[in-house]
Amino acid sequence: MRNEQDMAGLARYIVANPLRAGLVKKLGDYPLWDAIWV
């Protein structure tokens, strides 16, 4: 990663994986969702 902006984008990508995988309909539905900083 080159800077904090890259890190934030990567974090959003990782957190959205359950949504892209079809495990949930909304990010907040994922039971391990607690990254309020993303």
Image: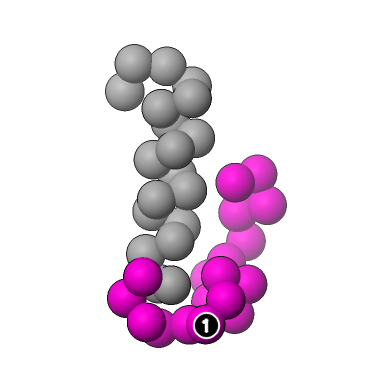
Magenta segment boundaries in residue numbering: 20-38
14 inside magenta stretch: no
Q: Examine the residues drawn in magenta and state their main secondary structure.
A: loop
Depth check: give the residue in front, 31 or 5: 5
Whether residue 13 is visible to the viewer of this picture, yes or no, is yes
Residue 24 % position (x, y) = 48, 82
Q: Would you say 22 lies left or right of 37 here? A: left
Taking the spot 62% from the left edge, 61% from the top edge, the residue there is: 34
Residue 16 % position (x, y) = 44, 61
Depth check: give the residue in front, 32 or 2: 2
Taking the spot 63% from the left edge, 72% from the top edge, the residue there is: 28
Q: Can you say whether 3 is above or below 34 in the image?
A: above
Residue reaching furthest right?
Answer: 36
Residue 37 % position (x, y) = 65, 44
According to the picture, the residue beneath numbered tag 1 turns out to be 25
Please name the colour scheme applied to the rendered image. one colour
Q: Which of the 4 quarters of the picture holds residue 6?
A: top left
Q: Can you say whether 31 is above or below 27 in the image?
A: below
Q: Would you say 4 lies left or right of 37 here? A: left
Taking the spot 37% from the left edge, 82% from the top edge, the residue there is: 22
- The amino acid type, in three-letter code, at marker 1 is Lys
22 inside magenta stretch: yes
Secondary structure beneath label 1:
loop
Taking the spot 31% from the left edge, 23% from the top edge, the residue there is: 1
